[in-house]
Image: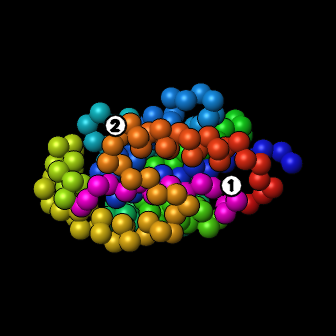
Amino acid sequence: MEVLPKLIVFSAPSGAGKTTLVRHLLTKEELNLAFSISAASREAREGEVEGKDYYFLGTKEFKNRIRANDFLEFEEVYQDQFYGTLKDEVERLWAQGKNVIFDIDVVGGLRLKEKFPNRTLSIFVKPPSINELQIRLKKRKTETAEKIAMRVAKASTEMATAPQFDVIIKNDDLSEAKALAYQTVLEFINKKVSDG
Ligand code: 5GP
């Protein structure tokens, strides 16, 4: 049985620290990972780069791509803010023989697991508490107060989906969370799966 490329999905409420964990794993060459660049309807924030952080499509183009059935999954993560994984993106990375790592919302994460049940490891990153999440988002200073409130409100429903994931990583202590994420992903990547 050959070792097929895998999907490693990190999902969590905004501010839980999943991006930090994903970036950490990407530095580990032996995992042979490549980051799936999502499409987003929103505008780039300062410092974000087109084709590196996201493919910034704008709302009109994003909706055209939905109609063209170009997405593996997509979500209106926040009101009028669409995010999605393009089929082309994953195929491009698989063609390079890479395992693909995703930093996406909980609904998108579970959808990918459903589509590729054997090949996907779904990981939920749990923040210490909703209160801590709010503090982290405020410190990050990337969102307005209104947007932070929106993200915090959504976090409670997102937290409730945690048991549906293969693995839950509690992010109280970052170095412990990094070590656990590495070990879990390494084991999964070395596992042989037939298909799906
Ligand atoms: P941000 O605006 O902070 O970059 O991202 C907002 C949320 O959208 C995050 O929770 C992020 O994980 C999620 N997200 C990013 N890309 C995708 C994607 O391709 N699909 C889905 N479903 N969610 C995504």
Give above or below for 159 relative to 189.
below
- Local secondary structure at mark 2: loop
Binning the other alpha carbons within 10 Å of mark 2 as few (below 14), some (14 to 19) or many (20 upward) gives few
Left or right of 18? Residue 26 is right
Residue 26 visible in the shown view: yes
User: For residue 120: magenta?
Assistant: yes
Left or right of 18? Residue 47 is left
User: For residue 174: magenta?
Assistant: no
Give above or below for 110 relative to 192.
below
What percent of the width, then of the height, locates residue 144?
Answer: 15, 52
Q: Quadrant of residue 92?
A: top right
Binning the other alpha carbons within 10 Å of mark 1 as few (below 14), some (14 to 19) or many (20 upward) gives many
Left or right of 126? Residue 22 is right
Name the residue at the right extreme. Answer: 1
**First reached walking from the N terminus: tag 2 or tag 1:** 2
Q: Label 2 sits on what residue type?
A: Glu
In depth, the one of 184 and 27 nearer the eye is 184
- The residues tagged by marks 2 and 1 sit, at their Cα atoms, a distance apart of 30 Å
The color scheme shown is rainbow
Give above or below for 147 relative to 36.
below
Q: Label 1 sits on what residue type?
A: Arg
Q: Quadrant of residue 60?
A: bottom left
Identify which residue is drawn at 78% across, 57% down: 195
Identify which residue is drawn at 59% across, 54% down: 121
Left or right of 15? Residue 75 is right
Disc number placed over residue 32 in the picture, else none:
none
Identify which residue is drawn at 29% across, 33% down: 47
Residue underneath mark 1? 119
Q: Which residues are magenta?
A: 116-130
- Local secondary structure at mark 1: loop
Residue underneath mark 2? 48
